Image (tube, grey):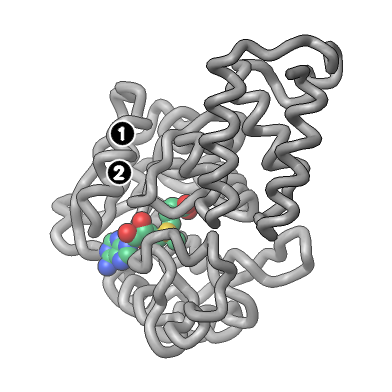
Amino acid sequence: MTRISLLRRTIDRLTRSAAESPRSTAQWLLAAALGIPPLSLYTEPDRVLPPDCLHRVETWTDRCAEGEPLAYVLGYVDFADQRFRVTPSTLIPRPETELLLEVATGLVEILPPGPILDVGTGCGTLAVSLARRAPGRAVYGSDIDPSALAVAEANTQGLPNLTLYRADLLKPIPEAAFALIIANLPYLPTSALPQLPKNVQREPRKALDGGPDGLLLIRSLITQAAGRCCALALEVGDHQADRVRELLEQAGFPRSRSLQDLSGMDRIVIGESDG
Ligand SMILES: C[S@@+](CC[C@H](N)C(=O)[O-])C[C@H]1O[C@@H](n2cnc3c(N)ncnc32)[C@H](O)[C@@H]1O
């Protein structure tokens, strides 16, 4: 079978099973099985596939057709120009979270010296990216879930300035103070979880469930972080930014602002302390 005929067959199979984004999923599966970038598939469309590649694509296609997210099938995802290992123990990093990384990178350049903490690091994308971008800063990543931390550990690539902790928000994080704390904590209201697409429901509940109003963990983190950092930058859910800014201002971050994502939704909220 040729590359192009398997690509068409895979798109057709995924479309019939109502899988997410059949064309791009099929391209990723075929390209990954061949070890080439997706666009290279079209340079030699009539090249015959080796039998092991055909078998791999068919197995992976079955898993995607059953609703397993592509990133779990491949075992990795690309985030901020780097490849990260992911497993069903970790949330699949979303492109909009790159905005939090860019905001954090900008803040790190202007904040006083001091360490950075990424709370709820999951597979470690934000902590690892920041540790690479700010080699002169100590960076910490924390998560409550040891299985997520094991994946983050595999993604640290031996970075000397990065340390991972198991912790429930800031407890017990020994460092007294940070220049910057960032977090993309679960922010979906519990009642929204049953309506999520079936592939999203395969992601860990601990990474999605933000309690009755979605702000359970964000509210606690703001309280715990007050007095322990110069700035706190948070990714928030749709229509949560104004409430989160109020919480920040009440907790002791007198200056706050929000930044919009590409869809025009306030997605990142930053609180700055006077200290
Ligand atoms: C939405 S995911 C974000 C993962 C990653 N930071 C990212 O942006 O892709 C939230 C993460 O918070 C972690 N988490 C949930 N409750 C927590 C808590 N009480 N303390 C620390 N981490 C927590 C989850 O295990 C999950 O890895």
Residue depicted at x 17% and y 63%:
171
- The amino acid on which the numbered mark 1 sits, given as a three-letter code, is Leu
Q: Which residue is mark 1?
A: 162
Q: Earlier in the sequence, mark 1 or mark 2?
A: 2
Would you say the residues marked 1 and 2 are in contact, meaning their CB atoms lie under 8 Å apart?
yes
Q: What label does residue 140 carry, if any? A: 2
Front position in the image: 75 or 248: 75
Q: Position of residue 264 (x, y in %)?
A: 78, 68
Q: Is residue 74 left or right of residue 167?
A: right
Q: Is residue 138 left or right of residue 47?
A: left
Asked if residue 92 is positioned above or below residue 192 in the image, the reply reads above
**Label 1 crowd bin: few (<14), some (14–19), many (20+), radius 10 Å:** many
- The amino acid on which the numbered mark 2 sits, given as a three-letter code, is Tyr
Q: Secondary structure at mark 2?
A: strand
Residue 230 in view of the camera: no
Query: Splitting the image into four quadrants, where does ligand 1 fall?
Result: bottom left
Residue depicted at x 75% and y 42%:
11
